Amino acid sequence: MNIFVLNAGSSSLKYRLYRMEDHMVLAEGGCERIGIDGRIKYKNHAGFSVREDVSFPDHETAFRKVLAYLTEGDGAVISDLSEINAIGHRVVHGGVRLVHPTRITPDIIREVEDNRDFAPLHSMAQAGVMRLCLKLFPASTFEVVVFDTGFHQTMPPEAYMFGLPYHYYKDYGIRRYGFHGISHSYVSERAAKLLDRDINGIKMVSCHLGNGSSICAIDGGKSVDCSMGFGPVDGIIMGTRSGQVDPTALFYIAKKENLTVDQLSDMISKHSGVLGLSGISSDDRDIEDAMLHGNKQAALTRRIQCYQIRKYIGSYAFIMGRLDVILFTAGLGENSASLREAALQGMENYGVQLDTEKNKATIRGKEGDISKDGSPVRILVIPTNEELKIALDTVKLVENR
Ligand code: AMP
């Protein structure tokens, strides 16, 4: 069975075509700068690889180009679109009602559009690509949508409610939604497999540390809290996002500098976090490099990062009443052994015992247990694979139709 996974952003479209019998990636790539100028990357399993500048006025032009690469020319991997059995779409925000992976119908697409205020940059592009697929693919192609917020819908109200007047929740759906759900659910399932344990009996804290970062408490395979909130800025500091900030500080800044809501939003989303604190870069590799050269601002940024990760792990262990596993994933979580070591320092008495040699050796896409033999809390690094998770969820729906 061939499954096509699509992940549309406001000006981008990532894609991956899987042969599910052996999880082989037949082709993958992405279109960027849609609506600006346009670039496409395409590569297939046989080593064909191309990067081309093209004019992409909209997602439809970009998508048609992807389909052309898949079916025509030297890099083609299928001869006809009917060889794609099903399509799995990633949608960032499902709101309150859209939770589980769902077969796409015009009503579902409308609901994604109705949720657009929750994720203005993504929702309309994602709904547009879903409509496009209904138009371009044969009616027999099964289409599924998987929601990044869906995994967190198991959070109890005490975790997702804010201390605001209740009617904002009732009227506008103001609450914690949590993000990176596809990633957290993938790595937690993978962890249970690696440990050869039933996921229902495991209490985990999953740290998805990338350009965007979130930490999630997972009890028995279900999300019970997440550091990201109503939007993807809450929680710990990220590449350019501030993480949690006392809102009164923002009101103060807005008044002092006469900022509009949009300018304030821009400041906490694009100019804060690792970039804003260090004044160097949003990329952790640059921070590590600067630290090695004695840059104090970089060292402070790293200390804040580690402190916040530790604080979330500790508080989530307490709310779950026990901690069995800590997971690290995403760009930083998978690659930065020094961050993992620094973040877990001082937690030995709570049973978090890192094997520093195993830790150093577990980078660049390697999966592994980096805890000491006998450590009461297992510490795992698991490369995330959101596309594969979407493909697997899609297969489940195809098989149960
Ligand atoms: P992601 O959003 O998951 O793609 O993660 C991207 C981020 O991961 C980058 O901005 C870097 O901060 C970080 N990252 C990627 N590779 C490395 C590496 N080898 N060492 C340290 N950090 C890395």
Image (cartoon, rainbow, N blue to C red):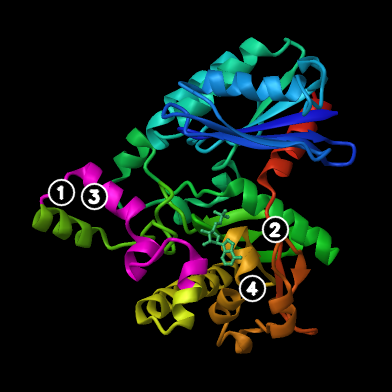
In 3D space, how far apart are the residues under numbered discs 1 and 2 (Cα atoms)? Answer: 40 Å
Secondary structure of the residue carrying tag 4 is: loop
Tag 3's secondary structure? helix
The verdict on residue 266 being magenta is: yes
Sequence-first disc among 4 and 1: 1
N-term mark: 3 or 4: 3
In the image, taking residue 100 as reference, residue 59 lies left or right, namely left
User: For ligand 1, which image quadrant applies?
Assistant: bottom right
The Cα–Cα distance between marks 3 and 4, rounded to whole angstroms, is 39 Å
Q: Main secondary structure of the magenta part?
A: helix
| Residue at point 74%, 75% (across, down) | 361
Q: Which span is picked out in magenta?
A: 258-287
- Residue 250 placed where, x, y %? 21, 57
- The mark closer to the camera, 2 or 4, is 2
Rendered position, 214 above or below 318: above
Residue drawn 82% across the image and 59% down it:
193
Which residue, given by chain and number where applicable, does mark 2 sit on? 383
Asked whether the residues under the numbered discs 3 and 1 touch, taking CB atoms below 8 Å apart as contact, a structural biologist would say yes
- Picture layout, residue 14 above or below residue 257: above
Apparent side of residue 88 relative to residue 305 in the rendered image (left or right): right
Closest to the observer, 1 or 178: 1
The residues tagged by marks 4 and 1 sit, at their Cα atoms, a distance apart of 44 Å
For the residue carrying disc 4, how many other residues have a C-alpha within 10 Å: few (<14), some (14-19), or many (20+)?
some
Residue under the point 79% across and 26% down? 74
User: Which callout, 3 or 1, points at the residue further toward the start of the chain?
Assistant: 1
| Residue 291, x across and y down, in percent | 45, 80
Q: Which mark is residue 259?
A: 1
Q: Which mark is residue 322?
A: 4
Q: Which mark is residue 264?
A: 3
